[in-house]
C-alpha cells in the first residue's frame, strides 16, 4: 500500500505553447512580470487557489474558427507541481477552451500517479460552464449587445463607447457596462453571405479621438496609451427557410354580435343672426328681440363626431310661452321630421352647404317666422322659447333616415301625422333656445 501523503504545491504556471522538458519554466512572479495576471488565494484549511487572467487578444491564446457561428479560444497551461515530503517535482499540462459568444467553458484535466511504480491513483477533470449572453439577435431584424468594462482597460468610460457609426451610442450605460440596441441595417453594420446564411456584424469601440490616452497637456510627458477596447458582435439569419403551420377551421354556429359601446355625443340648438348661418347669438345675447314675422334661423348640430355614416334627423321642434319645454301653450313647428302643415307660416328647411361643414349630415337648418301666442283674442306675453328633439341614425341603412314627408296640404285642426320609425341609434332631447322677445315698437 502506498503510504505517503501526496500534497501538491504549485511551483510555477506557464501559458502558451507546451514547452519541452528541457526548457526552464518561469515562476509565478515571472509570469506576472510578462503581463499575465496570476493571483494566489489562500484558504483556512491550508490549501490555496490561483486565478489566472489572460486577454483574449494575447498572443498566447489560440483562436480557432469552428464554423460561422462558433469561435473557440484555447489557452494552454503548464503547471509545475511537487510531491511532499520527498520534494519530487513534476509538471502537468492542461488547456482552457473558451466558447464565444454564448458561454465561457473552462476545463482542467488532472492525473494523479506514483512515478516509481507508475501507479495511476486518480484521473479526473473539472469543467465549468459560464453563460455569457453578450449579443442577442431578434427576428424583427434588431440586434442588442452588452459591452462590459474590463480590468485591462481601467480608464474605460462605457458611455463613450459607440458602434461603427459614431452617432450610434448606448441606449443605457453606467460605470460598469454599456447596452446597445439597433437595427441590423443601421449603425455601420456589415453584411456577409454564406451557404444559406447571412451574417450581420458590427463592433463596439471607443469613439474617434477617445481611443488610447486622453487629455494630453502641453509640457506634460505623455503616458502610454490605454489598451484598445473592441467588441465584435454577429447575428446569423437563415436566408431561405420554410415554416409549416397547421390550422383547422370550424364553422360558426352563429355570427358574432356587435358589442355595445358607451360614449358621449353632444347636439346643440343655436339661433343664427341671419340666413348665412355664419354667426350665432351667444348666451349673453339673450333675450333676442325680433319683429313680428321676421325670420328666425335655427341650427341643430352634432358636435365632436367625425363619423360620416351618422346622420342627424330632427324629430320634433316646438315653441312654448314659458322656458319649461313641457309647458303650455305649445305650438308644433316640426312633427316627426316634417313641417307642421297646420301652420300658416310653415317652417322652411334650408340645405346645408358642404363647403361650410366637414360633415353636412351632422347639421340641420330651419327657419320660422316670429310670432306670439294668442287665445280668444287675448295676447299672451310677447315672448317664445323654441325646443327640439333629434335622432341620430345610420345613413347607410334604411329606416328613419329614409323618411318621406306628406304633401304640403293643410291639415284640419292641426292634426299631427305620425309614422313608425326604425333603426334609431340615439335620441337627443333637452335642446332649447333662449328667450326670444317680440318687438312692438
Image (cartoon, grey):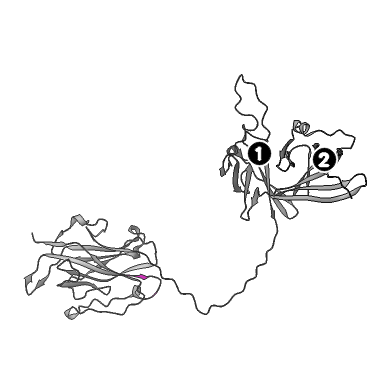
Q: Secondary structure at mark 2?
A: strand
350 in magenta: no
Q: Could you say which is closer to the camera, residue 401 or residue 393?
A: 393
Q: Which residue is mark 1?
A: 150
Residue 156: give x, y in percent of width and height.
62, 35
Q: Secondary structure at mark 1?
A: loop
Q: Is residue 84 above or below residue 240?
A: above
- Can residue 152 be seen by looking at this rendering? yes
Residue 259: give x, y in percent of width and height.
43, 71
In the picture provided, is 116 more to the left or to the right than 178? right
Picture quarter containing residue 328?
bottom left
Q: Could you say which is closer to the camera, residue 404 or residue 138?
A: 138
Q: Which mark is residue 78?
A: 2
| Residue at image point 61% right, 46% down | 186
Residue 53: give x, y in percent of width and height.
72, 39
Residue 183: give x, y in percent of width and height.
60, 49
Picture quarter containing residue 77?
top right
Give the extent of the magenta segment. Answer: 391-398
Amino acid at each position: 500500500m502506498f503510504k505517503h501523503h501526496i500534497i501538491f504545491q504549485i511551483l510555477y504556471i506557464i501559458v502558451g505553447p507546451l514547452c519541452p522538458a528541457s526548457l526552464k519554466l518561469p515562476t509565478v512572479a515571472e509570469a506576472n512580470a510578462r503581463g499575465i495576471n496570476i493571483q494566489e488565494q489562500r484558504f483556512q484549511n491550508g490549501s490555496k487557489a490561483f486565478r489566472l487572467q489572460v486577454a483574449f487578444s494575447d498572443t498566447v491564446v489560440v483562436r480557432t474558427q469552428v464554423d460561422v457561428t462558433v469561435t473557440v479560444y484555447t489557452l494552454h497551461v503548464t503547471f509545475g507541481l511537487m510531491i511532499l515530503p520527498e520534494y519530487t517535482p513534476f509538471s502537468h499540462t492542461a488547456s482552457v477552451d473558451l466558447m464565444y459568444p454564448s458561454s465561457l467553458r473552462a476545463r482542467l484535466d488532472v492525473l494523479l500517479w506514483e512515478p516509481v511504480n507508475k501507479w495511476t491513483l486518480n484521473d479526473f477533470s473539472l469543467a465549468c460552464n459560464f453563460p455569457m449572453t453578450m449579443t442577442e439577435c431578434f427576428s424583427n431584424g434588431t440586434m442588442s449587445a452588452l459591452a462590459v468594462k474590463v480590468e485591462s482597460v481601467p480608464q474605460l468610460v462605457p458611455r463613450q463607447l459607440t458602434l461603427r457609426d459614431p452617432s450610434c451610442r448606448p441606449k443605457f450605460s453606467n460605470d460598469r457596462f454599456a447596452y446597445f440596441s439597433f437595427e441590423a441595417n443601421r449603425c455601420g453594420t456589415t453584411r456577409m453571405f454564406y451557404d444559406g446564411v447571412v451574417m450581420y456584424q458590427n463592433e463596439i469601440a471607443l469613439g474617434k479621438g477617445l481611443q488610447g490616452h486622453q487629455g494630453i497637456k502641453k509640457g506634460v510627458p505623455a503616458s502610454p496609451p490605454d489598451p484598445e477596447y473592441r467588441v465584435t458582435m454577429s447575428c446569423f439569419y437563415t436566408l431561405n427557410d420554410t415554416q409549416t403551420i397547421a390550422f383547422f377551421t370550424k364553422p360558426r354556429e352563429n355570427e358574432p354580435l356587435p358589442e355595445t359601446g358607451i360614449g358621449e355625443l353632444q347636439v346643440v340648438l343655436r339661433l343664427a343672426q341671419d340666413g348665412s348661418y355664419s354667426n350665432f347669438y351667444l348666451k349673453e345675447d339673450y333675450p333676442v328681440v325680433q319683429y313680428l314675422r321676421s325670420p328666425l334661423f335655427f341650427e341643430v348640430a352634432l358636435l365632436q363626431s367625425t363619423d360620416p355614416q351618422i346622420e342627424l334627423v330632427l324629430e320634433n321642434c316646438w315653441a312654448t310661452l314659458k322656458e319649461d319645454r313641457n309647458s303650455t301653450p305649445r305650438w308644433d313647428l316640426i312633427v316627426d321630421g316634417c313641417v307642421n302643415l297646420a301652420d300658416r307660416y310653415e317652417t322652411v328647411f334650408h340645405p346645408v352647404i358642404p363647403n361650410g361643414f366637414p360633415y353636412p349630415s351632422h347639421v340641420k337648418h330651419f327657419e320660422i317666422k316670429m310670432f306670439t301666442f294668442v287665445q280668444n283674442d287675448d295676447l299672451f306675453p310677447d315672448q317664445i322659447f323654441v325646443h327640439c328633439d333629434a335622432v341620430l341614425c345610420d345613413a347607410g341603412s334604411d329606416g328613419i333616415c329614409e323618411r318621406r314627408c306628406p304633401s304640403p296640404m293643410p291639415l284640419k285642426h292641426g292634426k299631427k301625422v305620425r309614422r313608425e320609425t326604425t333603426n334609431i341609434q340615439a335620441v337627443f332631447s333637452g335642446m332649447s333656445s333662449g328667450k326670444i322677445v317680440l318687438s312692438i315698437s
